[in-house]
Structure formats: C-alpha cells, structure tokens
Image: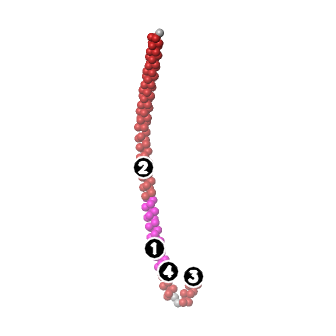
Amino acid sequence: MKRRNEDDATVGEDSFLDTTANLVGVLIILVVVIGTKTQIDAQAYGKQLAEQTPNVAGEVVAEVKALRGALEDQSRQTQAYEFESAYRSLERSRLLEEVALRQEENDQLLNQLDDQERTQIEQQH
C-alpha cells in the first residue's frame, strides 16, 4: 500500500508540473502576441508622425515668413514715423523763428513810434 501512495504522489507532482509548464507557455505566448501588437502599433504611429512632419515644417515656415513680413511692415512704419517727427520738428522750429522775427520787427516799429502812438497801439491790442 505504501507503493500506491508513492505512485499517487508522483502523479500529483507530475500534474502540478504540467499545469505550471502550461501556464508558463501561455504567458510566453501572451508576451509574444502583445509584443507583436505593440510593434505593429509603433510602426503605424511612426508612419503617421512621418506623414505629419512635413506639414508641421510647412506651417512653421509659413509662420516665420508671416512674422518677417510683420517685422518689415513695423520697421517701415517706424521709419515713416521718425521721418514725420523730424519733419514736424523742423517745421515747428521754422515757425518759432518766424514768430521771433515778427516779434522783433514789431518791437523795432514800436521803438520808432513816439509815446502817444505807442500807447494808442497798446490800447488797441
């Protein structure tokens, strides 16, 4: 009877080893299937990125061109403003000189007049 129990124990151990080997085999198959699926997905994603990259580069180039155009426009506007400012400054200086000359002429004319005429002009002013 002792031999029969040993045979039963051996059968139980063999069954356990078979079950363990089957589980390991199933896990290996799952790893291979998941790895293959991941590789296929990664390749598809890489192709998708490769197709999008030229579009992104084109958009960046277009944006750079637009920014350069805006910078040139702003530069032209700044130059026009500086030119206008310089012109107005010269015009203002000329007008101030003319006012000073006219005032000097008026002072000279007033000095040539006698006191009575000067008083009369100042009252009219």
Where is 53 relative to 102, above or below?
above
Disc assigned to residue 103 = 4
Earlier sequence position, callout 4 versus callout 1: 1
Cα–Cα span, label 4 and label 2? 58 Å
The residue indicated by pointer 3 is: 125
Q: Which residues are magenta?
A: 76-101
Q: Amino acid at mark 4?
A: Gln
Classify mark 2: helix, strand or loop.
helix
Q: Is residue 121 visible?
A: yes
- Residue contact between numbered discs 4 and 2, judged by CB atoms under 8 Å: no
Q: Is disc 3 in contact with disc 2, using a CB cutoff of under 8 Å? A: no
Q: Residues within 10 Å of mark 2 (few under 14, many from 20)?
A: few
Q: Quadrant of residue 37?
A: top left
Q: Residue at x 49, y 88 (%)?
A: 112
Q: In what element is the residue under mark 4? A: helix
Residue 61: numbered disc: none
Per the model, the C-alpha gap separating discs 1 and 2 is: 45 Å
Q: Main secondary structure of the magenta part?
A: helix
Q: Residue 13 location in percent, x, y?
A: 45, 17
User: Dividing the picture into quarters, in which one does residue 32 lie?
Assistant: top left
Q: Amino acid at mark 2?
A: Val
Is residue 40 visible in the rendered image? The answer is no
Q: Nearer the viewer, residue 37 or 76?
A: 37
> Mark 1: which secondary structure?
helix
* Disc 2 target residue: 64
Nearest the camera: 89 or 64? 64
Query: Pointer 1: what residue?
Result: 94
- Which mark sits nearer the N-terminus, 1 or 3? 1
For marks 4 and 3, give the CA distance. Answer: 14 Å
